[in-house]
């Protein structure tokens, strides 16, 4: 029970931080690839909204009842959600170099 005292605030901070980083990454990628096509630049809050919308439309979580396996999947999802915007920026930067 005493762990919940710091886990819940830490999880909330992590969720907010990942949302801001995702919005920042999407706004950078938008500027690199869609602004040259004539679309207007978007801000980080607009990009965060796009991330939420796309996640709601396309994310599907597989529910297994195996508890040991679920622990590892949750850790993998946390790492994936945290690292995804940085990998997207890396690949976007590489692609931008060929344009």
Image (tube, rainbow, N blue to C red):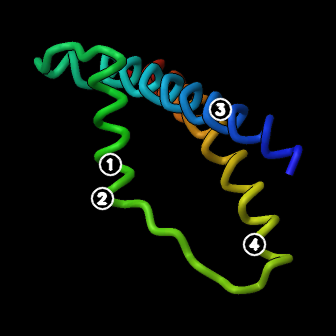
Q: Position of residue 77 (x, y in %)?
A: 66, 55
Q: Is 66 positioned to the left or the right of 33 in the image?
A: right
Q: Position of residue 41 (x, y in %)?
A: 22, 13
Neighbor class of circle 3 (other Cα within 10 Å; few <14, some 14-19, many 20+) is some
Mark found first going from the N terminus, 4 or 3: 3
Q: Is 58 positioned to the left or the right of 83 in the image?
A: left
Q: Position of residue 24 (x, y in %)?
A: 45, 19
Which residue ends up furthest to the left in the rendered image?
38
Mark found first going from the N terminus, 2 or 4: 2
Q: Nearer the viewer, mark 2 or mark 3?
A: 3
The residue drawn where x is 37% and y is 39% is 51
Whole-Å distance between the Cαs marked 2 and 3? Answer: 22 Å
Q: Which mark is residue 30?
A: none
Mark found first going from the N terminus, 2 or 3: 3
User: Which residue, given by chain and number where applicable, does mark 3 sit on?
Assistant: 14
Q: Are marks 4 and 3 in contact (CB under 8 Å)?
A: no
Whole-Å distance between the Cαs marked 2 and 4? Answer: 23 Å
Q: Nearer the viewer, mark 3 or mark 1?
A: 3
Q: Position of residue 6 (x, y in %)?
A: 80, 35
User: Which residue, given by chain and number where applicable, does mark 2 sit on?
Assistant: 57
Q: Quadrant of residue 99?
A: top left
User: Which residue, given by chain and number where applicable, does mark 4 sit on?
Assistant: 70
The answer to whether any part of residue 91 appears in the image is no
Q: Which mark is residue 54?
A: 1
Mark found first going from the N terminus, 3 or 1: 3
Neighbor class of circle 4 (other Cα within 10 Å; few <14, some 14-19, many 20+) is some
Q: Are marks 2 and 3 in contact (CB under 8 Å)?
A: no
């Amino acid at each position: 029970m005493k762990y919940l005292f710091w886990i819940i605030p830490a999880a909330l901070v992590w969720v907010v931080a990942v949302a801001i980083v995702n919005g920042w990454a999407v706004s950078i990628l938008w500027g690199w690839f869609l602004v040259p096509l004539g679309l207007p630049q978007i801000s980080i809050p607009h990009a965060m909204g796009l991330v939420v919308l796309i996640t709601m439309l396309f994310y599907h979580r597989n529910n297994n009842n195996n508890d040991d396996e679920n622990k590892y999947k949750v850790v993998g999802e946390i790492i994936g959600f945290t690292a995804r915007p940085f990998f997207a920026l890396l690949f976007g930067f590489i692609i931008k170099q060929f344009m």
